[in-house]
Image (cartoon, helix red, strand yellow):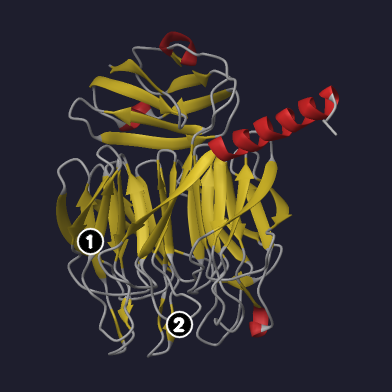
Amino acid sequence: MKPSIPSIIIIIIICVLFMAQISEAQWTAATLGSARSTLAAASTGSKAIFGGGIGMISVPPAVADIYNSTSNSWSPGSISKGRNWLTAAAANNKILFAGGGDDWILSVFDDVDIYNVTTSFWSTATLSVPRSKLAAAAAGTKILFAGGANEMLPQSYNTVEIYETTTNLWAMSTLSVARHGLCGAGAGNKVVFAGGTNTSGTVFNTVDIYDITTGLWSTAALSEARSYASATALGNKIYIAGGTLSGGTGVSKRIDIYDVVTNTWSIDSLSQARTALCAGSASNRVFFAGGTDINGFAAYKTVDIFNTTDSTWSVDSLTNGRSFAAATSVNNLFMIGGGLLSTGFPTNSVEIYTVTNTGIKQVIDNNSAFELIPNPVSNYAEIKINKAINAGTVEIINSLGAVVFKTNFSAGAHDISLPANEISSGIYFVKVADGENIFTKKLVKN
């Protein structure tokens, strides 16, 4: 019997919706130069770097795999010293890898490797205290390195070092509680460090919040105390997910969400409880990928994806389940690399999720994308973003092509303050990128 006309229409609609879902994104794969876990990753501009980590039977290799989104190519690099349990963050045109240890010879390090994405040159610095299992986060032009431990002493630290990318100067500060295994992320003018544990095994719900504008700290509390959670930011919100619960009793599926503008908290849930997972954001999506159970024997494939445009969740799957991996994003690419497989062996696999954001969308020209008020500017300028633009980033770029300011924004109309008082007189370009489009306007600083 032939299907009726209405049945055919329904089938066509289902097929169209299915194809639309497929066209929203796609997974591709790449490989690191070597298989390793407990590595770190960060990105800025068109480059992402996966650095450090440890293999199965060797000391940590001094390697860095560099991805260039402009040419869609990978190149080998190196950090000054091989180490695992290091951390990484990026701001302006700098990517920094800091701290770490060597599990095989039970050492911790104070090394900092600084990569300039404009010149492709590396330089080095040192932390005030050697430590591993620390956290890094960035906002504006500042990168903060917080906490960490020397588990051989044993001692956890409350040390915070603040690197200013425009001047290459360092400043010191402290967390409210000494701890390691914490996570960090930055959005707007705030940097957050959340959770963690100490060498006595106490697990904390402590959140330390740093305002880069005032230089002041405040504190808050997670809804569940946990360590080895993962954090990322998109727009004006910071997302803190998963982790190991107090007393090693289990793993968490909780997501604590902090709005840096309203200074308010909300909660949500992962589809699967897990620890040692990875987090990142690309275009208008927030990702939580991989992870393991309380025993560390599992290697989950689960990827929870939050669409900030319509506030909906979806669940996807990695080809290779992994824990203790590293993740970062470039433009509309979410990238997760390395980690431990369910076999207990490390992998060199990189899985890349491309957000294409297909569908009907209002066409926006460069003039209507955003406004700069005032222009020329002396102290602060306001950028007024068109409500039809997706979530993305705002950058101020100087005449040499260096990014001197960067912040994220969520989908919808926004007024963002640009700190022109922090830049010298001259001509700059303001770039707004939403994953699909790039809009630029000239900014004159008096």
Q: Is residue 349 left or right of residue 202?
A: left
Tell which tag, 2 or 1, sits nearer the viewer: 2
Say which residue appears at 38% left-offset and 66% top-offset.
Answer: 338
Please give left or right for residue 169 compared with residue 408 in the image.
left
Q: Residue at x 64, y 44 (%)?
A: 263
Residue at x 37% of width, y 31% of height: 395
Amino acid type, mark 1:
Asp
Q: Are marks 2 and 1 in contact (CB under 8 Å)?
A: no
**Residue labelled with disc 2:** 344
- Give the number of the disc on residue 113: 1
Q: Can you give x and y, in whole percent of width and height, for residue 254 in the image?
A: 69, 62
Q: Residue at x 25, y 42 (%)?
A: 166
> Residue 56, how many percent across, how many down?
33, 83
Q: Is residue 30 left or right of residue 206?
A: left
Please tell me which of labels 2 and 1 falls first in the chain.
1
Q: Is residue 351 above or below residue 405?
A: below
Horizontal placement of 320 versus 142: left or right? right
Quadrant for the N terminus in the image: top right
Residue 110 is drawn in which quadrant?
Answer: bottom left
- Residue 1 visible in the snapshot: yes
Indicate the quadrant containing the C terminus: top left, top right, bottom left or bottom right: top left
